[in-house]
Image (cartoon, rainbow, N blue to C red):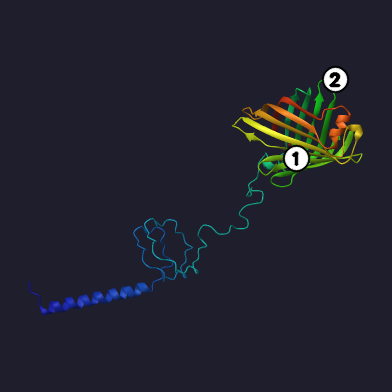
Amino acid sequence: MKISKKNLSFIGLSSLVLLTSSFATAAEMSSMDHSGMDMSDMDHSGMDMSGDMSDMDHSGMDMSGDMSGMDHSGMDMSGDMSDMDHSGMDMSGMQGGQPPADARSPDYSNGVPYGQYGKPMMMGSMPLWGVSVDDLGYQFDEDQINFESTGWYGTDSNRLRLRTEGSAQTKDDKEIDSLSSLAYWKPLSIFWNGEAGVAYDTENDNAAIMAGIVGTAPYFIETDARAYLYTDGQLRLDLGAEYEWRLDQHWVVIPEVGLTAFSKDDHDNGITKGFNEMETEVRLTYETFNRQLAPYVGVSYETALGKARGQRRQENESVDSNSLTAGLNSGFNCLPILI
């Protein structure tokens, strides 16, 4: 086919027109406003962003729109972006940030009525009750029954406690000596609780004001200290400590020690000033499956201290004694009382 000069001139003119229109299109696109474009369904999986983007200025970018449909799974963000300026980016539409002031009502109802049963009560504010028998055992050599029991009613932050401890003779006059107290109980810290109330001692037939602290000392040593101020001015101090050495899920060895001290002499009741007596016991306890009944066997030892030793000798009483013991511990707790 023969191309004439006229045809060549026409082809050249057409190419020039196409090239000019391409430059015009590029110039027009550079000034286009893309702010209203919806890019939520765009697939960016093939985009390579590994290049250097440190000089890019994002201060004018508006990212408040919905970008939930964008797929960024294939984007390569491995490039250096440490110098990127995000100070002007509007991210108010993204998840996070401070919630509005009325996001949740104080009672967690969010405006929804509670219905026919009324507002629910949190477990920590429900009044509960509990009874525990810390010791109910028999001392074979002394022929006596030792007991210690506690009952309480209230919440985790305020309780009323009724406590009694003592011994009952099983021979001769079958005398019962007990120290009972009714006290208000309140937590003082994470590991310590305080008590304050009134008490009555049958051994000296006297009432007293009681205050004490009970809790867990370091190394998980259960500790209690109680002071009793009697109506005759006598001050009694009881100190006790015990530790649970767990052998397995059921067998537990429990050593415990107790001290008793008085502020003045009371010869009518066999009391001397200072520390009067120390009691120790080691128990081997078996906790049943429900942990509410735990029988034990053990060995106890009691000794007089200070001037009390001489006084007991003068009255022909034993200064030291030891005995085999057997008994049980139990506890029944936490039944709600709805008022």
Residue 211: mark = none
The answer to which of 102 and 299 lies nearer the viewer is 299
- Amino acid carrying label 1: it is Asp
* Residue located at (89% from left, 34% from top): 206
Rounded to the nearest angstrom, the CA distance separating label 1 from label 2 is 33 Å
SS type, badge 2: loop
Specify few, some or many for label 1: CA neighbours under 10 Å numbering under 14, 14-19, or 20 or more.
many
Disc 2 target residue: 172
Quarter occupied by the N terminus: bottom left
Looking at the image, residue 185 lies above or below residue 14:
above
Q: Position of residue 169 (x, y in %)?
A: 82, 23
Q: Which residue has dot 1 on it?
A: 224
Closer-to-camera residue (213/88): 213
Q: Say which quarter of the image contains residue 76.
A: bottom left
Residue 63 percent across, percent down from the top left? 47, 64
Q: Quadrant of the C terminus?
A: top right
Q: Which mark is in front, 1 or 2?
A: 2
Residue at 92 percent across and 32 percent down: it is 268
Going from N to C along the chain, the mark reached first, 1 or 2, is 2
Please state if 317 lies on the left or on the right of 122 as rendered. right
Front residue of 125 and 52:
52
User: x, y (%) of residue 297?
Assistant: 68, 26
Q: Secondary structure at mark 1?
A: strand
The quarter holding residue 191 reads: top right
Q: Is residue 277 visible?
A: yes
Q: Residue at x 28, y 73 (%)?
A: 22
User: Image quarter for residue 17?
Assistant: bottom left
Amino acid under disc 2: Asp
Q: Residue 28: x and y, percent?
A: 35, 74
Foreground pick, 103 / 220: 220
